[in-house]
Amino acid sequence: MQKNNKSKSIALRTQVYLIIIAFLEVVICCYNYFLIPVAIVFYGLVIWYAIWSSKKRNTELTQALEDLTSKVGSTAKTTLINSPFPLSIIDANGSMVWKSEKFVNTFAEVDMSTILVDIADKIKANVINAEKNKGEINIETLINNKNYRLLGSYIKVNNDHKKNKKKESESNKPDSDYVMILYFIDETEIKALKQKVEDQDLSMGIIMIDNYEEISQRMTSEVRPVFIAQVEKKIYDYTAKYDVIMVKTEKDTFYCVANHASVEKMNDDKFSILNEVKTVEFPDSVPATLSIAFSDDGDTGIKKVESARAAIDIALGRGGDQAIIKENANYKFFGGRTTEVEKRTKVKARMVSHGLQKLIEESENVLLMGHSNSDMDAIGSCMGLYRFAKTLGKEAHIVNNSLGIGIDGFIDKLKQTPEYENLLIKTDEALDLITDKTLLIVTDTSRQNYVDSPEVLEKAKRVVIIDHHRRSTDFIDNALLTFQEVYASSACELVTEILEYANTKIELTELEVEALYSGIMLDTKNFTFKTGVRTFEAAAFLRRNGVDIIKVKKWFQSDILTYQAISSIVSSAEIMNNNIAIALYDKAEDTNANITAAKAADELLTIGGIVASFVLTKMGEKVYISGRSIGDINVQLILEKLGGGGHITLAGAQIEGYSLEEAKQELINRINEYFFETEN
């Protein structure tokens, strides 16, 4: 085979060029017969050069093959040429230079010309450019519906271009003088077996009826069993459809066992059971909602169950009515688009209050911390817990490194009050105060990367979480006590309940009461968003403790420049889908641009017909996105796609590496994804 290929001294492509040249010479000679001798001599020289250059290239290729096998003995060389795997040598353009007999037999019925060109292009783009001078090839390709792994090396056969090396590196183009020696390894069967094993790998799941207690309370004893039976039938029918083994362990909880293939089918189905179960309707009843979690993380069944429990906690922490798949430490979310309905009980608030009091009493000192760019909800909740700790006789400090929305006026007043002179501390001071018995209470966030000081969180061994946001995948998972209620309006509302139900009477100062009240006002937009009965009960408790509402409102007043900036943002907003406002705020000189953007997003919702608003601004290398909604659109799900989070009606995100226009386009893409997923 090798000899037969070498006997072809002139490549097919060169022969085509020679025919074209001959044709052109004949045409020219037809016009001038005196040029015939010159044409014959010229054509002879062209043929001689073609034969000479072809032989030279064959010599170089032969040398390259010898170089490839120079490290092995003569027996190994024979093995290489007579490889049991298809073996070929192609040039950088995908033209065949040499092929083994095994290659010919394997691909006898396949037109390899186009395939080899694609392979050469793939190697040049993904291997030669990326791994200059390494020479190794390891890629996958599909040939005739079979999966092949291509192993081998590439060699530069022409050294005349060394002097142009600098120019080549600047051009960033693959060198055309490479040849590629390739083994074709058929992995079709291996991949099929691997896929079969993966499909049979077991995942553990949990299905919970979110609002079982609420359903039980609203329905009579005669109707309730029928309603629950129909809901459970929907669940059993759905799991049976996908060959899922399910066992009811509690009145509202089901444990499941499913293979990977079944979970993938439910993934493709987008867990339609979330909507199907809501079709069960009875008079005076509320639709049932489910929280679902499947996980294959873990080497044993027990570990997979523990992983599924952690995932179901995330689903419940995000408001329920959704499904989560956890695969290889990655999460996929489905559903979660319904408005959160208040369904907290005072019993839990009392239990948390008593548990937190015990933890504080067992501690040497207490550190309080909110999220980065702290707002009044974060600081206000910390102020309330500060008084709780001080009442129990413990030293307490608030870790604060950054300021956010509407907090400047409050901080100024705080620093002017002697009692709070040393209340706020920086990260370095906090790290010096931490001991094994220090209690760190994190408020208004449960995300590891969003706390004001990740270093303090990492060092603290005893942590408590008090938050009202939907739980994300990077939640703080080592907390001794977690009070995370997505149905609450604010962290200040939760802290107010903790103080109200404490065993010890807590006397709040005027500034502490105002801080708690302002936190509730901030997150509810003056009691217009996400307010429930418990929100007004908390506000009433603070009102009884002497809050001055007029004084609190003054903290949120904007100066004339900020108001003008907000007006400018609102006037420049673009309307998407006739009901979504998107605006850009490009003012590098505004050190509080993210605060201005957030206020502008609130203002945009006051425009008739606008159901959601997004304002983008850039500070340093980050683009900040503030999202607001009146509840018809879940801005939290949209901004979660960009690494952010929050609530259905209020959310935010920070992204790096984008200009404002690029970030805007990325946001529009995510909004379109949201609507596509909702419709499908």
Image (cartoon, grey):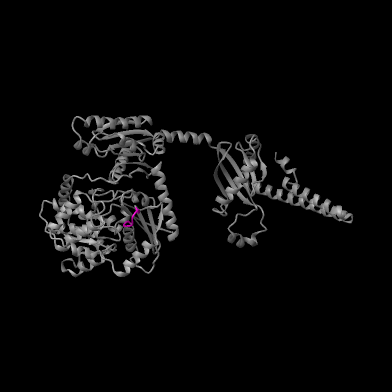
Where residue 89 appears, as percent x and y from the top left, is 64, 44
Q: Nearer the viewer, residue 78 or 324?
A: 324
Quadrant location of the C terminus? top left
Is residue 54 visible to the viewer in this orientation of the structure? yes
Residue sitting farthest toward the right: 34
| Total marks placed | 0
Regarding residue 73, the answer to whether it shows in the image is no
Q: Looking at the picture, does residue 305 appear above or below residue 596?
A: above
Confirm whether the magenta stretch covers residue 607: yes
103 vs 14: above or below: above
Q: Position of residue 206 (x, y in %)?
A: 30, 37
Q: Name the quarter where the N terminus is drawn.
A: top right
Q: Is residue 497 left or right of residue 78?
A: left
Position of 88 with respect to 334 (left or right) is: right
Residue 252: image location, x then y, percent: 25, 35
Question: What segment carries the magenta color?
Answer: 605-610
Q: Which residue appears at 59% of the width and 41% of the height?
A: 183
Observer-nearest of 117 and 136: 117
Main SS of residues in magenta: loop
Q: Is residue 640 above or below residue 513?
A: above
- Tell me: 128 left or right of 208: right
Q: Identify the residue at image location x=67%, y=54%.
A: 158
Q: Please state which of residues 481 and 462 is positioned toward the viewer in this rendering.
A: 481
Residue 293: in magenta span: no
Displayed quadrant of residue 266: top left
Residue 607 in the image: state x and y as whole percent: 33, 57
Q: Which residue ends up furthest to the front in the rendered image?
A: 608
